Amino acid sequence: MTLLVERPGVVEEPGGPEHDHGPTGLLKWVTSTDHKVIGKSYLITSLVFFVLAGVMAVLMRTQLASPDNTVVSQHTYNELFTMHGSLMLYLFAGPFAFGGIANYIVPLQVGAPDMAFPRLNALSYWLYLGGGLTMIGGFLTVGGAADFGWVAYAPLSNAVNSPGAGPDMWIVSLILTGFSAIFTGVNICATVFYLRAPGMTMFRVPIFTWNMVVTGILILIAFPVLTAAMVMLWADRHLGTHIYTVSGGGVPVLWQNLFWFFGHPEVYILALPYFGMVTEIFPVFSRKPVFGYRGMVFATITIGALSTSVWAHHMFTTGVVLLPFFSLMSYLIAVPTGIKFFNWIGTMWRGSLKFDTPMLFSVGFLVVFLFGGVTGVFLASPPIDFATHDTYFVVAHFHEVLFGSAVFGGFAGLYYWYPKMFGRMLRESLGKASFWFMFVGFWVTFLPQYLLGLHGMPRRIAEYSASTGWTSLNRVSTVGAYLLFIAVAIMIVNVYVSWRRPIQASGNPWDGHTLEWATSSPPPHHNFYRLPPVRSERPLWDFNHPEHTTRKHEDLLAAEGKRGRRHAPGAHAGTDGGPADR
Amino acid sequence: MKSEARLLLVVSLFGAAIGALFWAVGLNPVYATITSGGTIMLGAVCLLGLLPGYYYHWWSRRMTPRAEDDPEATPESGAGVIGVFPGSSIWPFVLGLSALLVCLSLVFGFWTAIFGFSLALAAVVGVILESRRGGAI
C-alpha cells in the first residue's frame, strides 16, 4: 500500500491505520519494503554465510594442522579456500555492513522514515539472497564449486582450466550480488542526501552515516567494473572470445587490472562502514563528543578517493605496473587512516570510559587493525612485496585487516545496535567471554601465519612435508582457529539466550548521542513519532543533557546573533568537547 | 545541497587528476599498454562524479533552501509531506526472482531466461500499476 509520509511533529502517528490490513506471515516478509525488516533479513542472511565460511576455515585449518594431512582432498581444499574467501568478502563483510547494519541504522541516524527507494531496497535483498544461494549451490554441481581463489585470475579461471557449472555459478552470483550492492549504494546516498532531519546539515550527519555515503560512492565506482569483468570472463568461457587469453590476442593481466580496480576499493567498502561503527561507539562509551569530527569526515573522503588509485599494488609481481606511483599512493593511505586512529584515541582520552561489550570489541578492533595496517605499509613497498607475495605473510596481513574490521568492528556494531534492532539486550557476561576468546584466538591464529610467511610457506597449498619445519607454527594457528570458532559459538548462544529469555531494552540503553536512540526499540513503522531539534552532530545528547551541550557557548551566541555564522572568534566548531564533557 | 554537490565534484576532480596523470605517463610508448586500462577507469570515475555532482550544483542554486541545509531549522520548519513510500509490495521479490532466472541462463541454458523475462515483464507491469493505483500487493 502506498502512503504519503509526513514529517514527525505534525502527525503524531506516521504510518497510519492501513498497516493493520497488510499481509501476514511469510507473505508479510516477502512483500516488506520496510528498511528495518530488510536490514534484519540482510543481517541474518549474512551471518549465516559468515558461519558457513567460518566452518570452511576450520576445515582448512584442520587439514593444515599436521604435514601430509588428508582430512580433505586437494580439490576440496581448493574449493574451500575459494568459497571461504568469496563468502566472507562478497556475502558477509560487505552485505553485513551496507545491507544489514547500514540499511537499518542510516535512515534512523538521519531521522528518515525509510530508505529513499524502499522497493529498490527490497530488490537489493532478493538479488543478494539469490546470488548467495547460487554461489553456495556451486557445491551441488558435478565438478564442485569454483576452485580458482576468490580473485579468479585469468588463465586459471577459463573454460579449459576450470570447466564445469560451479565456476559459472560463481560468476553469476557475483553479477547478482554486484547489482544488489550497486542498488544499496544508490539508496544510501539518496537517503542521506534527501531525507535528513531538519537542521541536520551534512556536517552534522553522524560519522557512521558519513562513512556509508563514501562507501556508497565507492560501491558505485567499483562494482560496475567487477560486473563487466565477470561478463567478459563468461564470454571468454562460453562464447569463444579472447579477452583474457594470450592465444587470441587478449591480455590476461587485464583481468587483474579490472579485478583489482574493483578489489581495492572493495577492501575499503568493507573497512569504512566498520570504521564508522567504532566511531559511533567510542564517543558513547567515553561520554564525550567524537574528537575532530571534520577531520574524521575528511579522512574518510581521502581514504575513499585514494582507494581508487592504489589497485595495482596487488599486482607488483606482474612486472607491468607503475611501481613508484602505486607504492607512493599506497603509503599515502596510511596518512588519513593515521588521522582516524589519532582521533579515536583522542575521543577516549580523558573520557569516562565504560568497557561494555561494544566498547571492548571496538578497542580490540583498534589493536588488531593497527597491526594489519602496519604490515600493509610493509607490503606497499615493492621489494618487501616481491619477497612475501603469495605467502602466508600476506594471508596474515589481510586477515588482520579484514577480520579486524569486519568481525571485531562488526561484532562491536552488532552488540551496540542489537538492542535497537530487536528490542532486547545481549548478555554482557557472554559478550565479554566471546570477546576474550576472539581476541586471544585471533592472535594465536594469525601471528604464527606471519612467521610462516617469512619462512616461505606459500598460500593456497593443501599439504606440506614435515621437512619444511612448518608443523608447529601451523598447529598453533589451528588451535587459534578453534578458539575463534568457540568465540562465534558463544555469540550465537548469546543471541539464543536473548531470544529465549529476553531482557527488554529501553529506547536508549547506552545513553546514545544520535537520532536512532531517540525512538523506541525496535522503532515503530516509519521510525519516529517526534524528533529532537538538531543543533550538532549529537542531537540526542544535547536534548537529554542540555547542561552539557555539544555546542560551545560562543557558538550559541553566534547562532543567536548572526544566522549561519559557524565560528566565534577563538572558538572551535564545537565538536571537540566542551569543558563540561571532560 | 551544496555539500553534496561538492562531495561528488571532489570525486570527479580526483578521478580527472589521477586519470590525467595516467594518461600523461601513457604518452611514453614504454608504458602505453600498462596504463591504458587505468586511464579509462579513472576517466569513468571522473564522469561518475561529474554527472550527479554538477546536477546538484546546478540545482542547489535554483531550489528553495531546504530545512536539512539550514543549521538553525527546527523540527516544525521541516513539517509537511516528505514523499511517497510504498508500504508493501510483492514486485521486488518477483523482479529479483526474474533476475536470478535470467542470470542462471548463463549457466543452465536459455530456457530459464524465458521464465525470467516473463516474470520481469509481469513485475514491471505490476510496479507501474501499483504506483498508479497505490493499491496493496
Image: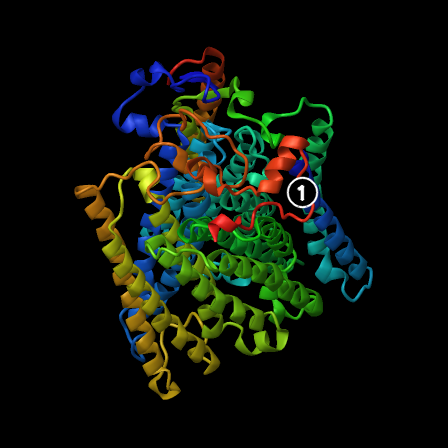
Q: Position of residue A566 (x, y in %)?
A: 66, 40
Quadrant the N terminus of chain A occupies? top left
In the image as oriented, which residue stretches furthest toward the top? B133
Choose between A415 and A459: the one closer to the eye.
A415
Percent position of residue A144, x then y: 35, 56
Residue at 57 percent of width and 73 percent of height:
A378
Residue B47, position as x, y percentages in the image:
71, 41
Query: Badge 1, how many Cα within 10 Å: few under 14, some, many 20+?
Result: some
A18 or A578, which is in the foreground? Answer: A578
Whether residue B126 sits left or right of residue A49 in the image: it is right
User: For residue A478, what is the image quadrant?
Assistant: bottom left
Q: Secondary structure at mark 1?
A: loop
**Residue type for callout 1:** Ala
Location of mark 1 (residue): A568
Q: Can you say whether B128 is above or below A119 in the image?
A: above
Residue B4 located left or right of residue A42: right
- Residue B103 visible somewhere in the drawing: no
Residue at x 46% of width, y 37% of height: A546
Give residue A18's quadrant in the image.
top left
